[in-house]
Image (cartoon, rainbow, N blue to C red):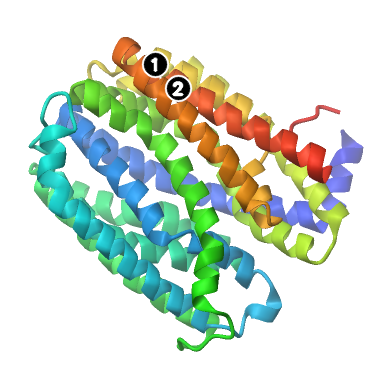
Amino acid sequence: MIKIYNKLLKDENSVEVLSKGFSFLILKLIGTVFSFSFTLYITNVFGKEVWGLFALAMSIFTLTSILGALGIDTHLVKFYSQEKNLDDVGIYFKSLIKAFVFSSVLSFILYLLSEPMVNNMFKEPKPELLTYLYWVLPSIPFWSVIVLSSGVMRARKLNNYYGFYTIVSRFLILTSIVLLFSFTEIELVLKVFFYSLLFISLVSIIHVTIILKNVTIRTKENSWKFLKQSIPMMLSSSILVLMSWMDTFVMGIYEDESEVGIYNVAVKITSLTVFSLQALNSILAPKIAKAFASGKKEEYLNLISFTTKLNFFITLVVVFSIVLLNRFLLGLFGEGFESGFIVLLILCVGQLINSMSGSVGVIMQMIGEQNKHQTFIIISLVINLVLTLILTPIYGGVGAAIATVASMIFWNVAGAVFLKINKNIVTYFKPF
């Protein structure tokens, strides 16, 4: 054990992953505190039905935002992680314009279709969802801007800023204002959500301008070719988000708002298990991209092995703690939420199994295997969709959870096997 510890101290990459990953973890904890505080406020003041409607609106918001970003944020991580590309400022601003216009068009189309959607898509019409969509949909282009801007910060290893914009900022402002004024009308809460994203997006653009030290749309790259290369990353990211929110959305089709609210709270608590993975991936992605581009195979193999082991042990501790404290955690959100225990347990077991596979998605995208990664994700989506539609009407939240876990396990294991066989890269957990 002492030898391993000493080795880590001498390994600059491991020390950097630990130090910057820890900083990101702190930011993630801060963001989670505000996010959970917001959820607690809504569930205790407005009830689980309102939270269920908010969760449905956020499922539409999140997926459309990922589609609107066009995968450019991930491509920017690869691009700006290489020193030779730092002078090419124009690709950021051209990409920003394309993403903003595209996400605005998507939002407008959904806005026009929102009324028939809430009346015809669900087993029981949900016209009350319109109020949420009328404020959430116009927020989408601004969140796409924030995602792209944070991609540049992630590439330049400014992990604290990346974590602040993507995890902390929106709930920091939203929760602070909601708690300060103790809103009792949900529409006021939605208005704050919109204006906070508008403000944060403007600040993020100014921040990236300072980082890149220039403002221009001139670029040495073909911006349309750059966009074309980003699409596979967008598809992978959007499908992953679709899988993570599909269960909530399908629950909304077959179940009432209160059941959706209970299910989404269980999902929210389970999100605590991915803290370490997100923290480690935030610094791992640009380092792997840079090491791979430089041909330093031993360097990125050591990084992958180290982060996989660290993530597994942290996830194990978190899962054990959640299961042990399940009644307390679920009870915080109000009466009736304790019924989400089985869903919580299934999702936690799934996350523990996934942690053993390592950072499969990030690795494949950073070494140029985004198309193969996309294939695995698409297959997983099909598995998720089929199982969700079959199991949710029969078993409710338990069925939705099983479908989600099964699909996540498939793409993680398939990716790990592919990397081992074709690239001789071991991403999965090996105790020795």
Circle 1 sits in a helix, a strand or a loop, which is it? Answer: helix
**Cα gap from disc 1 to disc 2, whole angstroms:** 6 Å
* Name of the residue lying farthest toward the top: 394
Quadrant position of residue 83: bottom right
The reply to whether residue 317 is in sight is no
Quadrant position of residue 264: top left
Classify residue 289 as left or right of residue 90.
right
Q: Are marks 1 and 2 in contact (CB under 8 Å)?
A: yes
Q: Is residue 244 above or below residue 13?
A: above
**Residue designated by label 1:** 399
Q: Quadrant of the N terminus?
A: top right
Give the image location of residue 354, x and y in percent. 61, 30
**Residue designated by label 2:** 403
* In front of the other: 139 or 223: 223
Q: Amino acid at mark 2?
A: Ala
Give the image location of residue 137, x and y in percent. 22, 54
* Residue at horizontal 81 percent and vertical 45 percent from the top: 423
- Around disc 2, counting alpha carbons within 10 Å, would you say few (fewer than 14), some (14 to 19), or many (20 or more)? many
Circle 2 sits in a helix, a strand or a loop, which is it? Answer: helix
Q: Amino acid at mark 1?
A: Gly
- Around disc 1, counting alpha carbons within 10 Å, would you say few (fewer than 14), some (14 to 19), or many (20 or more)? many
* Residue at horizontal 54 percent and vertical 54 percent from the top: 232
* Residue at horizontal 46 percent and vertical 43 percent from the top: 239
The reply to whether residue 187 is in sight is yes
* Residue at horizontal 54 percent and vertical 72 percent from the top: 225
